[in-house]
Amino acid sequence: GAGVSQSPSNKVTEKGKDVELRCDPISGHTALYWYRQSLGQGLEFLIYFQGNSAPDKSGLPSDRFSAERTGGSVSTLTIQRTQQEDSAVYLCASSLGWTTSTDTQYFGPGTRLTVL
Amino acid sequence: AQKVTQAQTEISVVEKEDVTLDCVYETRDTTYYLFWYKQPPSGELVFLIRRNSFDEQNEISGRYSWNFQKSTSSFNFTITASQVVDSAVYFCALSEAESNDYKLSFGAGTTVTVRA
């Protein structure tokens, strides 16, 4: 079946612009996660959704970052007024449930964001 | 504090050699889960294995094997008779059931290059 898909695969933007990154989880998966992979910070958790609600937003780096999920499916990560330090690969994952004891997180290919 | 440490940044081997990737973790939870993911050049993280803290039995899957030792807080991964297709970045990750059982904390990753 189809895996997690993300779009765009690459995004180049100018400093100060807003960007939206999209994630389509595996059909039927109730949990959705955003992670960021950067050279300096490695792979770090940003936010996760149970259905449409986000119980843990603690990993979002600043208030310029926000995410939403609608219909228990597609999620959008928005970065406002992008900065060069936002340059990274943004990875989305989904799982059937939200406990890692039983539910494997399956990752998408990521969106590579470059802020000039 | 870093919860997962992968001290080896890069490992280069010749095909058919065995390679062992080290992973040391830190947690105060008594129930936790350990994972290995593979990230090939395509970028998508691929799930390899999950172990819970109560199961110290070693596991073998084809050419892959894992050695979990609670006494040393280690969860090492061995690829036997490596092949060029094993070239990838390998991540060890931890999930703590008593605090954040949905969140994966990743190590910095080990880049494995298998030369023909």
Image: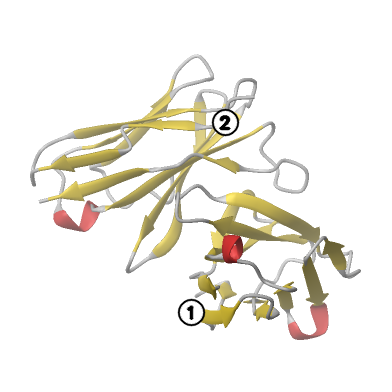
Residue B22 lies left or right of residue A110; in this view the side is right
| Residue pointed to by mark 1 | B10
Residue farthest along the top direction in this orientation: A71
Q: Position of residue A33 (x, y in %)?
A: 51, 40
Q: Nearer the viewer, residue B41 or B27?
A: B41
Q: Which quadrant does the C terminus of chain B fall into?
A: bottom right
- Which residue is depicted at the point 67% across and 71% down? B82
Mark 2: which amino acid? Gly
Query: Counting other residues with Cα less than 10 Å from the Cα at mark 2, is it few (<14), some (14-19), or many (20 or more)?
Result: some
Residue B79 lies left or right of residue A91; in this view the side is right
| Residue pointed to by mark 2 | A3
Residue B7 lies left or right of residue B23; in this view the side is left
Can you say whether A107 is above or below B90 in the image?
A: above
Tell me which corner region of the image, top left, top right, bottom left or bottom right, holds residue A51.
Answer: top right
Tell me which corner region of the image, top left, top right, bottom left or bottom right, holds residue A23.
Answer: top left
- Which residue is depicted at the point 61% across and 57% down? B37
Q: In the drawing, what numbered circle is on residue A116?
A: none
Say if mark 2 contacts mark 1, CB within 8 Å. Answer: no
Q: Nearer the viewer, residue B65 or B15?
A: B15
Q: Secondary structure at mark 2?
A: loop
Mark 1: which amino acid? Glu
Can you say whether B43 is above or below B67 in the image?
A: above
Q: Nearer the viewer, residue B53 or A14?
A: A14
Residue farthest along the front direction in this orientation: B116
Q: Position of residue A17 (x, y in %)?
A: 10, 38
Whether residue B64 is visible to the viewer of this picture, yes or no, is yes
